Each structure stands twice: as C-alpha cells, then as structure tokens.
Image (cartoon, coloured by chain):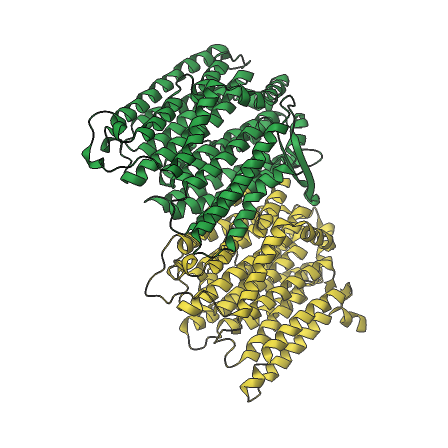
Amino acid sequence: MILSIKLLLPEIFLSGIAIFLLLLDTAKEVQIKRWAYPIALFSLFFCFFLIGVSEHGISFQMLAIDPFSSFFKTLTVLSCILVVLISSKDSILMGEQPGVYLSLLILSSVGTLFLSSVQDFFMLFVGLELTTIPLFILSGFAKKELKSSEAAIKFFLVGAFSTGIMLYGISLIYGLCGSTHFSAVREYINLTSGIPQDKTLFILALIFILVGLGFKLSLVPFHQWTPDTYEGSPTPITAFFSVSREAGVIVVMLRFFNDFANQSLIGLNEFFTLLTILTMTVGNIAALKQENLKRLLAYSSIAHAGTIFIGLVAGNTLGREGVMLYSLAYFLMSLGAFAVVIVISQIRKSEELLAFQGLARQNFPLAFLMLIFLMSLSGIPPFLGFWGKFYVFAAAIQSKMFVLVAVGLLNSVIAVYYYFKIVHAMFFKEPIENLTPIPKNLNQTSLTIATGFAAFLILCFGIFPEQLICWIKGSAPFLP
Amino acid sequence: MSFLSLIAFIPFLGALLLLFVPKEKVNTHRLIALVFSLFSLFLTLSIFCHFDRQNPGMQFVEKFSWIPQFGISYHVGIDGLSYPLILLTALLSVLSIIGSFQIETRVKEYFFWFLLLETGMVGVFVSLDFFLFYIFWEVMLVPMYFLIGIWGGPKKEYAAIKFFLYTLFGSVFILIGILALYFRSTPHTFDILQLIQNNRQFIGKFQFIVFLLLFVGFAIKVPIFPFHTWLPLAHVEAPTAVSVILAGVLLKMGTYGLMRISFPMFPEAALWFSIPLLILAFINIIYGALVAMAQTDMKKMVAYSSINHMGYALLGMAAFTLTGFNGALLQMINHGIITGSLFLLVGVIYDRAHTREINAFGGLGAKLPIYTGIMTVASMASLGLPALAGFISEFLCFLGAYSANSQHKIFSSISTFKFFTALSVIGILVTTAFFLRMIQKVFLGPFNEKWSDLKDMTFRELVSVVPLTALTLLIGIWPHWLISLMDSTMSSLVNFINGVK
C-alpha cells in the first residue's frame, strides 16, 4: 500500500496543491489571491523533481510507473508550466478567480499524469474524465462571452457522448475477457487467435473505444467540435487544449492500441490507416481557408494528430519513438504559436490574420519567433518539428506503408501553404493603419520567457537531437 | 584546418552578427555582408592552390558523428565536381552583395537572409551525408522565399510562394528516396560515399523507383521541361541580385544532385534513362530557346534562356562520356557566370529606365558605350560565340552527346543520340537570333530621345559585373585551368557509371 502510494508522489502532490489553490480563492483580499500564481508555478517546477525521484514499479495493479510514463509526465508538467506562464496577464483567467483557474488547470494535468501510466480500462476511463471535466469548465471560463459558452457546451456534449461510446466498448471488453486489465485483453487475443466469431465482437469493442478516444483526439470524422471550441475558449485554454488532451490520448493509444497494430487483426490496421489519411487530409484542407488564427491552429492540430497517428499505425519501435518525439515537438511549437497569438490578440483584440499584418515591421523579434514556430510546424529542418515528421515517416517506410507516406508528405506540402500564409501576412504586408501598433517593448516578462524557452528548445533539439533521441530510446522500450 | 566548414558557416556568423547591429546603420549592414562573403570567397580561393588536381576522390574531408542513433554524421568534402561550383557560389555571392547595395528598404533583413542563403548553398555542395544534404537543401528555401517575396517585383508574393511550394514538393520526393535508401542499405547509412560504394545492394525495380523519386526532386530545381513553370515567374519577380543567385547557383543544384547522387548510386537506371534524358534535354533546349524568342521583356528572355542553357548541360550529362560530363559541368559554371552577368546588366538598365521592354529602347550604343560593350560580350558568350566561355562548354556538350555510344536496349542508341544532338543545334540558332535581335533593338538603330539623360554604369555596378566579364573571356580563351580541376573526378565518375553496366 505504502509502496504503491510512493510511486504516485507527483500526482498526489499536485492534487493537494490544486485543492489548496481552490481554497486560496476564498480569501477576501486580492493580494492573497495573487499568491496562487507563484505557488502554482513553484509546485509545478517541484513536480519535475518528484517525477525524477519517484521509483518505478506497478501501483495498485493499475498504473505502471516507468521511464515511458516519466517522459510523458515531464511533457505534461512542462506544457502546464508554459500555459501558466502565457496566461499570467490574462484578465479573464487570472482576474477574479486565479485560484480556480490554476487548480482546474493542474487537475486536468493530473488526469494526464494518470493516463500516462495507465494499465487498466477503468483507470483509463477515470483518467480521461479527470482530464476533460476541468477542460469543460475552463473552455467556458469567459462567462460573459457567448462564444465561450458555445465552446463549452459543444465540448461538453461531445465529450459526454464520446465517453458513453467508450464505456460501452469497455463493457464489451469486460464481457469478453472477464477483466479490464490490459494484460487480460492481451491474453484473450493469444487464446482466441483463430476463432473468428468472437473476434468480430472484440474488434467492435476496440473500435468503440477508439471512437471514444478519437473524439477526444479529434480524429476525422469525429472532429467537428474542435474548431468551434478552439475559437470560443480563452486563448491560453485553447493552447492547453491542443497539448494536454492530445498527450493523454496519445499516451493511452501508445500503451494499448500499439499491441494490436502488430497482431494481425482483420481490418483493424486498414481502419487505422484510413482514419489517419482522412484526419491529415481533412485537417489540412479545412485549414487552408481559415482566416482566424485560432481556427487555423485548430485544424492544424487535427492534421498533426493525424500525422502523429502515422507512427502508431506503423507499429514498430521507430514509430513509437516517433510518436513521442513528435508529441514533444508539437507541444512546444503549438504552445509557442498560441503564445504569439495571445500577445497579438491582447493588443489588437483580434485573432484574425489581418491583425498579424506587418508584424515584422513593428516588432521583428516577435515575428521571428513566430516564424520559428511556423517553420517547425511545417516540418522544415533544422527545427524540432522536422524530426517528428522525419521519424514517423521513416517508421512508415520501414513498415512499407508507402501510400500512407505519400499522402502524409503531400499533406505536409499543403500545410506549408497555410502556415506561410501567416508568414506572408507578418513579413510581406504593411501594417494596417487603424489597428493599434505592436510596441517594440512588450513588457510581458513571463510570456517572453515562455515563448523564448519554447523556441530555444525547438532550435536546440532541432540541431542537436542526439540527447533527446537518447532519452526517448531509453523510455520507449518500457511499453508493454 | 577545417576550410569547408568555415566557408559554409562564415556567412552564417555574419548573419548572426547583423542581428546585433541597429536597424538604422544601413552602411554597416552592407559592410558586414560584404566582408563576411569576401572572407568566404578568400578561403575558397585559397583552396585553389592546395587542391590536388590528380586526385579524383574527396579532399578536405571533415567527418564528425552528429546523430549516432541514425548513423548521421556531419560529413563534408569536395572533389572536382563540387569545388568549381563552390567557387562559383562564393564569387556570385560577393558580386550579388555588391550588386544589391542599392537596396534601400529593410536592408538588415535583406542581408540577413542573403548570408543565410549563402550558407545553405555552400552546404549543399559540400555535404557528403545525404541527410545533411537534405537539410541544407531545405534551409536554402526559406531565405529565398523571403528575398523574392519582400524585395521582388509586382507579382513577388505569388512568385515567392510558388517557388517555395514547388521546390518543397520536389524535396518531399527526395526525402522518400533518402529514407528508402536508408532502410535498403546494410548497414543502414545516410553516407553518400558509402551508398555509392555499396550500390550493388540497390537492384531491380527498387533502383528505378528511387532514381525516379530523386529525379523529380532534382528536375524541379534544374528545371527540366514539365517542371519548369516556377522558373520564369521567380526569376523575373526576384530582385536583380537574387535572380543572379537563382540562375547562377540554385539551378545547378539539380544537375549537381543528378551527377553527385543519382548517377553513381544507380548506374543501371541512369544508363537506362539516358535516352529519356536526352529527349528531355532536347525539349529543354528547343522549348527554352523558342519561348525566350517570344519575349519582349529582357529579364524574361534571359530567364527562359536559362532553361535552354540548362538543356545543354543535360545533353552533356545524358551522353555518359567524359567529354559530355566535362562539358556539362563547365556549362553549369559558364551559365552561372554569363547569365549572372546578364541579369546584373538587365538590372542596371531597369534601375535607370524602370522598364525592361526591348522595344522601348533604341540606339543606346552611342549613349552608353561601356554598358553596351559589356552587354554585348555577355550576350555573345550566351549565344556561344567562339573565344568566349559559352562556346567551349556548349561545344563539349554537343561533342560528348554526338560521340555517345550507350548500349541501350530499346532504341538503336547511337543513331538516336546523333539524331537528337543534331536537332539540338537548332537551339543555338534560335538563341543567336534572339540575342542579336535584342542587341539590335536596344543598342543599335535610331536613338530614342526619351532616354537622353541615361547615365552609363557607375563604379559599383562595374565592380559587380566586370569580374564576370573577365572570367567569360578567360574561360573562353584558356579553359584548361578550370577543366583541369574537374577532369580526373569526371573521368573516374564516368568510368564508375559505365563500368557497372
């Protein structure tokens, strides 16, 4: 018991902090409420330490704490820190109830932490709910804005619906295998290999679960809620959305579905491939027409989810490592891009492409940072995004999935077009006159630190990826 | 001393340094750009004395492990194929930087991108690791996108994105090819030299598929006929100095890629494709020349003549003979020098008259004697007048193709080669026609009074053009110094390809 608890130090610590922050908000004086911000930041940093020292092992038969989960935990906490940093000046989120906001943010991250070591469908369900329920609230945090409420409602309805589907799948699995543990499912496959009638039901159950997860990961055709929710939510939340939600689901997929990609279950691999191709293509083509940056990044996140999925479909070691590296890269570049959008929208009150016109003339460093994020998103070397792309495509070529590679790479050319539409606005256009000019000095220390740090990592790991690859190679084999 | 890395990364250091100079100090920016590119040129020239002309292999090699997990290394080196092209790159960069001193808007950014571009270009020519090659290949695109898109002509934005997407589309194929080669080779490697050494591993269909994949990527850069549509737009819309780089250096990367990578790595496929290559070369020559003839805009004319001239280089390559290869490489260099100076010269007249219409001028010969003289030399070189650079290389290309004796299975190859080579000579006639017509309409005939206050070339413009004119004459009269650089590498390359037959 004690041993099992010892393994969960980061989760327990962060949950405690989240509750404490919630309590802090009951204070009458604003001065005390303001303490929430440094406390949250400090405890998140401390969490790195806890992740580092916590032992490895199996906790309560349900959670596997291993280097693989540590990798995703580090990612989650890192992205949470970045989100806290970029939202520090946000009047809606950090205004009246900073404690509530921060505690919800941290709780959602705790859900992702649980997901990263999940070994059992029950735990998967609980972790997923813990991740998403705070997000429902957060997306509706701008109470006075209609769009924010719309975002929350849409997200909530779709979330509840998809959870239902997934639960149905889980109950089918339980009926078939007699347990909800991943290992029981694995045994079941080994036992029944060759008996077709149960296989249909089993595949159906898997597909139900996948559909449930697909909603959360916004794979096409389960993606329709994404753009509206992204557009309506407060921008830092949108940024958080694009990373935490994806991290949780991807890690689960890696842990669980990856096993089945190798098991030649009839049709399942083709189903995955189709889903991947659809997700990339639809995401990219829909993004072409977007004029609102948040919507554009929403569609681009769909497309990236598709590309990450290539690594899963490839189903080899290289693919798994690729998924991990791509996730890290995507977190950094997506958070960075959103951070720049936040700066612009705070000054100009708009997230349209027009607001970005002439940014290079008014504030070159900011435009240059955005350029780095966009080039990384487009997968141009030597930025980290390129390594993600390279890794997953290499994996797919190793598995001889040439159609997937061809579609994926053509998609990456399409993607360049809309990312460079933003570059075009920033560098080629003159600033629009009746918009507030972007000052040279932004006076936003924490935002600058966050974006600078993200850009630094993207460049550094992009040019010298050796250490990063080492770390990933050390973590990936711990997958069951 | 690590010469090659210095040549490649000194411009990059210059670009970084530029970032720390305040925006207003325009002259400092110009000076920094000039000094750093000059330094790079100086180092390139200093290699000239140490370069071993008898050695067909790689020289000045540097190799460090970069990403050991994939066996990717920082592996650079030069031989007779890449060294002349690096010379060309370093020289044209310096001259274009001098040529772009009149840029007044966003000077800092301009030179920043320009220096970054130089690093990318040199990097492509020196890298011997396929992965490194790909990275430099891509890195080069972004500065070019900005250079065309910000400082270009009226349709600059469309031209920039078209160039960018087109080339990116091509490099996607290259990436697939690289990965396919990586997984096919045992041990898995990205090292170009190792892949060439072990090219027997790539047999059958695989060889042909990967050859085609790489070919699409390289053909877009050359550009070879159906992939050429980005070229006129990008060349015409780009600012003068960038057109020089585009035509002078970037186009060579396609042909360089074919010679460095595709041919020796897949000799069987390469020989099989020699007839299709020949036909594509023929189309490039005739099509480029005819379309150039139809142009009334001087810059467009020069741009289309590039397609024609790259056709000659391709013709020499398709022959797979030593003469042909030498001719092709010499043609690449000459095209860089001649077309570079033509673009600079068209830029000179455009800066004064703000038009490039051939019909708008007339009788400038008496008014601008120096300009007329240099322009005439460049045009004559471009149309292949003996004793000027263009003649030598075109002659070698034709000679090589005419004497080709590849053992092709489908066509009775020898007569096919002779037939298409003979037909390609028409290209030279057409080229002569449009250059002479241009000279006649612009410099001869009655003087158009509208241009009575045009001034002749300034000192700065002369500095940027005269070295190229001098080289044109030098190579035309005494090409040996250049051919001796490439000869041994080329002969070992030809033997290598034909030996595996």
Q: With respect to residue A125, does B64 lie above or below?
A: above
The chain whose colour is yellow is A
Q: Position of residue B60 (x, y in %)?
A: 65, 33
Q: With respect to residue A5, does B350 lie above or below?
A: above
Dividing the picture into quarters, in which one does residue B82 lie?
top right
The answer to whether residue A207 is left or right of residue B23 is: right
The answer to whether residue B115 is left or right of residue B434 is: right
Residue A161 seen by the camera: no
Q: Position of residue A318 (x, y in %)?
A: 66, 46
Decide which of B39, B119 is in the foreground and name it. B39
Image quarter (top left, top right, bottom left or bottom right) of the C terminus of chain B: top right
Check the image and name the residue furthest to the bottom.
A28
Residue under the image location 59 percent in, 76 percent down: A37
Residue B436 seen by the camera: yes
Decide which of B305, A215 is in the foreground and name it. B305
Residue under the image location 62 percent in, 43 percent down: A394
Decide which of B198, B129 is in the foreground and name it. B129
Dividing the picture into quarters, in which one does residue B193 lie?
top right
Q: Position of residue B372 (x, y in %)?
A: 32, 28
Image quarter (top left, top right, bottom left or bottom right) of the N terminus of chain B: top right
The chain whose colour is green is B
The answer to whether residue A244 is left or right of residue A480 is: left
Q: Position of residue A230 (x, y in %)?
A: 47, 64
Q: With respect to residue A238, does B273 lie above or below?
A: above
User: Could you tell me how many numbered marks the image carries?
Assistant: 0
Residue under the image location 40 percent in, 47 percent down: B149
Check the image and name the residue furthest to the front.
B459
